[in-house]
Amino acid sequence: MSQPKTVRIDLVADFVCPWCWLGWRNWIAAKKLAPDIQTEVTWRPYELDPALPAEGAPYRDYMKAKFAGANADHWKAMRTHLEAAAPGVGIEFRFDSITRRPNTINAHRLIRWARGQSAKKADAVAEGLFAAFFRDGKDIGDTATLIDIAVEAGLDRDIVTDLLASDRDVADVKEEANFFRQLGVTGVPSFIFEGQFAVPGAAEPAVLADALKQAVDLPPRD
């Protein structure tokens, strides 16, 4: 008797993207709609603003510049939608508590190391990053904050401290992020099923569950 297929999903995300947290929680709900399908999710990096300085920028100034003029109404509408949708998936956005827009390269390095240990630790790091930034207003570009998130997820404090003090995997993370840009990913989150088709954005659980059911019937990727 053959083993049931495990559907592989690349989740392309950035941890300062509120839609990514919402999309991740929608994914968790989607799996409950298709409980018999085994899945393997791999977090993939995407830098919404790779030109941001390493130290980040003041959040309010950054957002005012990004959503200036007519875009201000667009941001207000998005924020209203996000704050309304969040309780339904068990999360909370506290945009007023955010003081810094961080550069996320180190957050992506951290989840890369976590995923090298286990998917469970990678998921825990992702949740920790989202909650720290959007709920607690912490700077997830700050080394001490990242170390605390890592330890909470089960990673070794000393190892992560040494890794963050180096430039290990910076080039690899950027190369991986560029790969997904070249693949055609222009926004996040993006759920890529078996490397063959994608569901962009924070799709509803039913949409993601339908995609998962379609992916079961795809031939395996090389």
Image (cartoon, grey):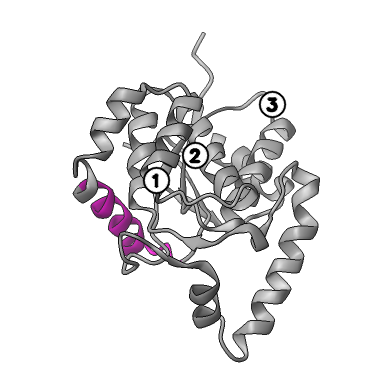
| Range shown magenta | 172-186
Q: Nearer the viewer, residue 10 or 45?
A: 45
Q: What's the residue at 54%, 58% (across, down)? A: 17
Q: Secondary structure at mark 1?
A: helix
Of the residues tagged 2 and 1, which is closer to the observer? Answer: 1
Q: Which residue is mark 1?
A: 107
Quickly name the residue at label 3.
35
Mark 2 or 3: the one toward you = 3
User: Amino acid type of disc 2?
Assistant: Leu
Q: Position of residue 216 (x, y in %)?
A: 55, 34
Amino acid type, label 1:
Ala
**Is residue 58 placed above or below 209 in the rendered structure?**
below
The image shows residue 137 at horizontal and vertical percentages of: 58, 52
Element at badge 3? loop
Q: Residue 32 shows which numbered tag?
A: none
The alpha-carbon separation of the residues under discs 2 and 3 comes to: 18 Å
Which residue type carries mark 3? Pro
Residue of label 2: 218
**Is 94 part of what is drawn in magenta?**
no
Nearer to the camera, 187 or 128:
128
> Is residue 212 depicted above or below 192 in this figure?
above
Spot the residue most to the bottom.
69
Q: Are marks 2 and 1 in contact (CB under 8 Å)?
A: no
Spot occupied by residue 119 in the image (x, y as percentages of width and height) = 46, 27
Q: Of marks 3 and 1, which one's residue comes earlier in the chain?
A: 3
Q: Residue sitting at 60 percent across and 57 percent down?
A: 18
Where's residue 66, x and y in %? 50, 79
